[in-house]
Image (cartoon, rainbow, N blue to C red):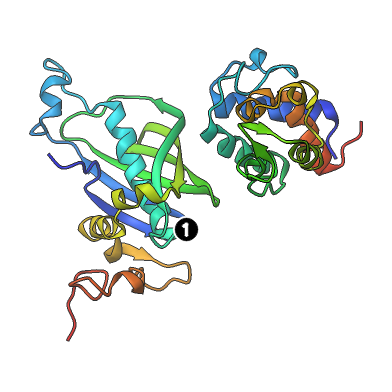
Amino acid sequence: MPTKDEVFEKIQSSLVDALGVEEEEVQPEATLVGDLGAESIDFLDIAFRLEKAFNIKIPQGELFPEDILTDPQYVQDGKVTEAGLAELRKRMPFANLDNFTKNPVVQDLVNLMSVADLCRFVEGKLGVTE
Amino acid sequence: MRWYWIDRFLEFESGRYAKAIKCISLAEEHLHDHFASYPMMPNSLVIEGMAQTGGLLVCEHNQFAEKVILAKVPKARFYCDALPGNTLVYTATLEYIKEEGAMVSCTSYRGETLHAEAEIVFAHLNDARVNSLFDPETFLRMMRLLGAFEVGHAPDGTRLKPPARLLGNSPHSDGNGQKHG
């Protein structure tokens, strides 16, 4: 079982390879889209590298639940509804959604995902606690 | 000029890897300008050749059911020049294939010398609007032209064949264009 530091180091290395960024740019508070320049196709690449690095499986929609953001049941006028936010909290326990919930514009969700969120996602899948 | 940047498959193991050659000729027009005093194969077209090798590997593994497009090149390194008279051997190895896309790792060898390495990510398009842009038979024709069915093997070791569903409208009944009775 890796430690939290080891999880971060592997994620750092995966993001350097997937996004072509410098290692020092990949800090816990860095956002994938805003700070590291990730685009939608990069999430496929990142998911694969995490699968390989940690020997885990990441089904489509687990890291980033696009299905919620395109479901009229959960989205109205370009914003995620209360029911949608509840679903997001359930599906994304690793993500800090505090800022997003203040003005839940659909397009902003992907911009908020940070390196720390990725670390918590992997820690959750592996059961890392230390 | 046709957009073929490989000349022939040497090996094709479904779902695993494919190996193709690119023969560089001074007769190729793009070499006249790249560069006038030092004709060399443009690295971007080497990547395209690797992408064609790997892209057809992904297409075939999906039984030509997905629209496979080159989405990103996370890594590309070149170690020497490829010049007229050289033959490059591209090998594309399937790293992963998922519902949303696939990745291959590629090498290019000039004889015994490692010429280039690359990683290439492909996306599977599922937008109904692009259906008309990607005719599966186009890729099937390309596989035939490049001889993939002559050298290819399925995972169980049997000879590589086109999917039966694509043979219905085809003038050919097997992978090598041999028409049967």
Residue B23 visible: yes
Answer above or below: position of B94 versus A45.
Answer: below
Q: Is residue A118 left or right of residue A39?
A: right
Q: Which residue occupies the foreground of this view, A100 or A58?
A: A100
Q: Quadrant of residue A47?
A: top right
Q: Which residue occupies the foreground of this view, B135 or B5?
A: B135
Q: Residue at x 28, y 72 (%)?
A: B167
Residue B132 locus on image (x, y percent):
30, 52
Q: Is residue B112 left or right of residue A31?
A: left
Chain letter for mark 1: B
Q: Residue at x 21, y 35 (%)?
A: B86
Residue A24 locus on image (x, y percent):
66, 13
Instruction: Please tell me whether mark 1 sits on a helix, a strand or a loop.
Output: loop
Kindly identify which residue carries mark 1. Answer: B15
Question: In the orientation shown, which residue stands out farthest toward the front?
Answer: A77
Q: Which amino acid type is marked by label 1?
A: Gly
Answer above or below: position of A4 versus A99.
Answer: below
Residue B88 locus on image (x, y percent):
27, 39
Q: Residue at x 36, y 70 (%)?
A: B163
